[in-house]
Image (cartoon, rainbow, N blue to C red):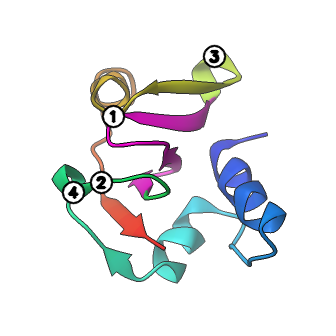
């Protein structure tokens, strides 16, 4: 399962629609917020990657290079993805 499928699965379990791909999800969810205001259930997007905030400091995502779904620190994840894939957060959405 990849990152966008994980997000879609979260919504499906709650009987809500969510597009399959991250590029479509980022267009579908309209409410933008600032990273500093993140809270549980907010969605963080990079180009081609997505994660869900579990709290102000933790997130869950399907991390391709390790082929695992992981719970990690938000700041740690942002730094890791910047370092390994040279990607920056492009949006944070609130449902």
Q: State the mark number for residue 38.
A: 2
Chain-order first, disc 1 or disc 4: 4
Q: Is residue 4 left or right of residue 26?
A: right
Is 42 included in the stretch rendered in magenta? no
**Picture residue at 41% right of the left edge, 69% below the top:** 94
Chain-order first, disc 3 or disc 1: 1
Please name the residue that numbered disc 1 is placed on.
57
- Nearest to viewer (mark 3 / mark 4): 4
Say if mark 2 contacts mark 4, CB within 8 Å: yes
**Picture residue at 41% right of the left edge, 42% below the top:** 55
Q: Position of residue 76 (x, y in %)?
A: 32, 22
Please name the residue that numbered disc 4 is placed on.
37
**Quarter of the figure with residue 3:** top right
Question: Is disc 2 placed on a helix, strand or loop?
Answer: loop
Please name the residue that numbered disc 3 is placed on.
66
Question: Is disc 4 placed on a helix, strand or loop?
Answer: helix
Say if mark 3 contacts mark 1, CB within 8 Å: no
Q: Position of residue 75 (x, y in %)?
A: 27, 30
Which residues fall within the magenta stretch?
43-63
**Quarter of the figure with residue 25:** bottom right
Question: Is disc 1 placed on a helix, strand or loop?
Answer: loop
Q: Is residue 19 above or below residue 75?
A: below
């Amino acid at each position: 399962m990849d990152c966008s499928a994980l997000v879609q699965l979260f919504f499906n379990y709650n009987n809500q629609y969510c597009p399959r791909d991250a590029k479509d999800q980022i267009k579908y969810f309209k409410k933008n917020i600032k990273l500093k205001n993140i809270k549980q259930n907010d969605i963080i997007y990079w180009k081609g990657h997505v994660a869900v905030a579990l709290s102000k400091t933790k997130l869950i995502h399907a991390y391709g290079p390790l082929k695992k779904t992981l719970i990690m620190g938000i700041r740690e994840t942002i730094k890791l993805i910047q370092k390994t894939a040279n990607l920056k957060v492009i949006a944070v959405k609130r449902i």
